[in-house]
Structures are given as structure tokens and as C-alpha cells.
Amino acid sequence: MTDLLTSAQMRAIEQAAIDSGEVSGLELMERAGQGVVEAIFEEWPELAEPVEAGRGASPSSSIAHSDQWRNQGRPPEYLGKDESPRRAVVLCGPGNNGGDGFVVARLLKDRGWEVEVFLYGDPDKLPPDAKANYERWVGPVRKLANLSENDLWPYRGALFVDAVFGTGFRGELPEDIRGAYEFSREQITTNGPSRFVAVDMPSGLCGDNGRAEGCVLPAHLSVSFHRAKLGHFLKDGPDACGKVVVKGIGLKDSPAEGADGRSPTVPTDGEIVKLVAPHLPGKRDGVHKYSHGHALVLSGGHGKTGAARLAARGALRIGAGLVTVGSPRSAMAENAAQLTAIMLQQIDGAHGVSELLEDRRFNAVCLGPGLGRGADTQALVVAVLKENRATVLDADALTRFERTPQALFDMLHDNCVLTPHGGEFARLFPDLAEKLNAPATAGPAYSKVDATREAAKRAGCVVLFKGADTVFAAPDGRCSVNSAHYDRAAPWLATAGSGDVLAGFITGLLARGFSPMQAAETAAYFHVECALEFGPGLIAEDLPEQIPAVLRHLQVC
């Protein structure tokens, strides 16, 4: 899996490399600037062509956009025939991100570009490495503060490089650089001719939680270093970043020992959040259906059975050997009319569930979808958890405990998976939701990752916090993100019943013997892949039926 770093983790890795003597901060800054220039030319190859007298900039190639601030399908074009050399405007900030910007400016100028540099802050207060690159820049430096949108209009059509604030930014953009924000937003929303590149993180976006508390300078391309950051994949990050490219700057994940013989402090593998990758081994030869588990999905009463059938279909398609829907008497006919490969068993109340689970071949249970929020749902949850089976609790099985969440946590075991969306998470973990929604002004920003980790520790089991930025956490601190963004954006998943199918996918994988964390990660990954396979027009019933095609594409037998 790909690592996603916080700003503090990235600083620790950089500092460890510097302390070990492997590299200097100035060398890292030079490599970062070179990486940005490389990424620009890779994204828009026509800009890499040598600048010749009388030759202007070529029309741009297609740019990968997110939806919120961009229109799809039309690349920005230069107006008319620009006979001037290529132009760049580099916006530098008061920290080391600004130092990266000065390197970019110098490298582009060395290639014959006309480069304008703006600085936010006092050059005398720049950090040492940034100050060194400020002094290496041979052109004029104008003040960025208090520029209006109109002040930047003469540069319309240029390449803009945002190196104002980096991954450590918190809070809102200062009021005196809002002009740059207004200009960039206007250019991107109207498909204007300018192209915008963010160094590490668009200014105004928090690198740790992906939140834009106020304005953010949106980008077509965001260039990160060594590893992607959490903010690229959480909350507002994907909309602001456009496309994310990661450039190596020669850092190791485990730097050598320092001169004093001690190993530097770097984040451990367990502390680092992972970006989910597919993992679904094929079925073994020479086995029978019970070798792949028997999943039980509990159904609601008459008129509330569809959610359970969606989950059951998902469990069967993802590979459970057998799936049974446990139905109350009032819904037996309704369920029987629409089930074929999935079996049906009448279960009336908690006692009926306990009796059925005396058959030890039932090794995974899903309950919550369509169950209702009455006392009978709570009794079913209690009965299932007493049997110590792999269990997925979703929807009503979670909401039923909103007044007494600790009562639920006291019953949970480490073979459970909770699958709340934002509203359900707030009902079970109101204090964590409040912290998550509070603005970050100083110190480490509280993120969805932090909230999910705390929730998993409190519940004592795996928590899957739903969203386009789905976050998974285990009680031991392991954490990962499944991103439905960028080339995996699947807005069609916002449809009734898709979460029920996800619960079924997890249950089916638990039945097959997956660990709770692995089942949750794999199910969510395939959930997105199924949506991408079908495309627009998706409804929940379509999701399980895409599994065969997705498995073929991933070459899973």
C-alpha cells in the first residue's frame, strides 16, 4: 500500500535525513524545485519545448480536473496567438515552501521563460535555506500582499506556481492575499488560459485533514515530495488539488544513524496511514462451499426487506460459500419471492437468532440494514454479539445505541466491524465528531483519520468511517484510506442502498476468513471498482453484478 504522511511525519523524515548527514536542507529544496519543474513538463509536454524567438506558448493539453471548481472536457487555451516567450508567475510564501518556489522560478528562467516572482512576507525573515534561494534569484521580487484580482489580470495565460503555504498550513488564508485566490478561482471555473500548479499543497488547504477553512488557491496540478500527504485525499483536498503527482527527493523511509550513533526519530510503519490497494485472493481448488464460509444477513419486517437482500447479494457475489437471509415471519413471503441462490430461514426475535447460530457453520453475521430502531433490534444485536461470530454492524444496528453507545462498546469484540456514515458516527461518538468539525487554528490538525483511530480504540474493533474518503482503523492504531477521488472518483455511489451492499461485501469476506481490517479495506476498494465498472446510472442492485468483471480485470481467479 502507498503511504500517506502527515506534515509532522514528513518533517521528521526530512530532519532525520539532514541530521544523519545524508543530505542538506538546501539540497532537498533544490530537488523539490526540480521535481516541480519535471512534473510541469510531464503534465504539459509542449511547455518543455525550447523557447524560440517569435514563438509563443502552445495550446494546452487536456488537464485532469476535479468537479467542484472545474468544468470537464475543455482544456484551457491561450487567447489568440501569443508571440511572447512562455511566462510564469511564482507566488512564494514566508517559509520553506516559498524557498521551493524560488528554485522553480530560477529553473524556469534558466530555460528562457519570462518569470515574475511575488513574495508574501519579509525576505529578511525567511528561513535560512529559503533565504539562500531568495538571494540566488536574480530578478525582481514584488509584494504579494494586498494585490487585487485586477493586479494579476495582465498575467492571464501564464503558468502560476503556488508556493505560498505548504503542508503545515492551518486556519484561513490571510485577508491580504485573497486577490490571488479570486483570480485563480475565476481562471479555473471559467476554463481560463492560465495553468495553476501547487507546490506540495494548494495554499489554504490543511495538509493533515484536507480542510479548507476559508479560501483555497485551487490547482490543476499539485506536486508533492517523497510521499503523498493525508490532505491530498481527505475532505476538500481532492477538489482543490486537481491532480496529484509525487516526486522523489532522495529521502529514505528509514534514514541512517546520525553522527552521534543514534537512530533518528521517524514514523513507524504502524503510525503511517496507508492508501488501500486491492487484495482478494482467488478461491482454492479442491474445496467445497462451506470452505468459503456461511454468512447470515438479518432482514427487517414486512416492507423493510430490500436492504438485507442487497447485503446478502453482495456477500454471495464477493465469494461467501453460502448466504442465508434470516427473516421474521411477517416478511417470509416477501423475501422468498425474490431470493434464489440465497437461502431463507425464518427467525423470530433474539431467541431465534441464538438457536440458528448454534450451527457453527454460520461464521459471519450482518445486521442493521432495514432492521428498524426498536427494542427488538437491540435484542438482536445483543444475541448476535454473545455468539462471538465475525459481525458487521451497520445502519439501524448502530443508530439504536445512539443514547447509550457505551452499552454497545462493552459488548463488541475484536472480530466486529462498525460501518457508520457521518451521521451515525456523530451519534455513537459525539465528542469525536465535535472535534472533527471544529476549525483547526494551531497545532496538529484533527482529521478524519484521528477521529476514526480514536473511535476504533474506544469500540475495541475495526471502524469503517464512510465517505468518498473512507477511513478504516483498528484498535491497535493501524489506519488506511480508500479514496474515491481523482481517477477513482465514483459519484454514482451516492445512491440508496449502496451502503447495504458494502456491508454485504464485508460480511462475505469475513465469511471467507478475512481479518476484520482486511475485509473492510478490500470490500470498500471493490465497492468503488464496481461503481467505476458500471458508471453513470448506477443503482445499488447493479453493484454486486459488477464483481465478476472487476475480478477479471484484476486477474483474480
Image (cartoon, helix red, strand yellow):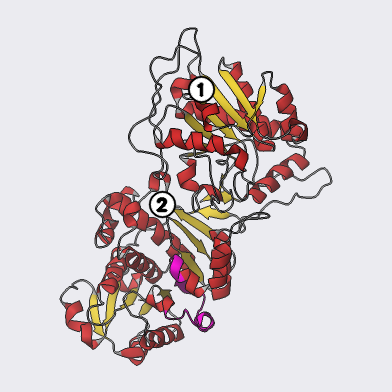
The number of numbered discs placed on residues in the rendered structure image is: 2
Residue 527: horizontal and vertical position, in percent? 35, 58
Say the numbered circle drawn on residue 484: 2
Q: Amino acid at mark 1?
A: Pro
Q: Is 367 a magenta residue?
A: no
**Residue numbers of the magenta segment:** 400-424
Residue 480, placed above or below residue 142: below
Please indicate, yes or no, whether residue 460 appears anywhere in the rendered image. no
Q: Residue furthest top?
A: 53
Task: In this rendered view, identify the residue nearer to me: 519 or 184.
Answer: 184
Residue 331 shows up from this direction: yes
Work out how far the residue at label 1 is from the one at label 2, CA to CA, in angstroms: 37 Å
Instruction: Give coordinates of residue 416: x percent, y percent.
Output: 47, 74
Sequence-first tag of 1 and 2: 1
> Nearest the camera: 457 or 47?
47
Q: Quick one: SS at disc 2?
A: loop
Q: Residue at x 62, y 39 (%)?
A: 176
- On the image, numbered disc 1 is attached to which residue? 154
SS class, disc 1: helix
Residue 512 location (% of width, % of height)? 38, 68
Q: Residue, x 77% and y 42% (percent of image)? A: 19
Residue 289 position by quadrant:
bottom left
465 left or right, relative to 178: left
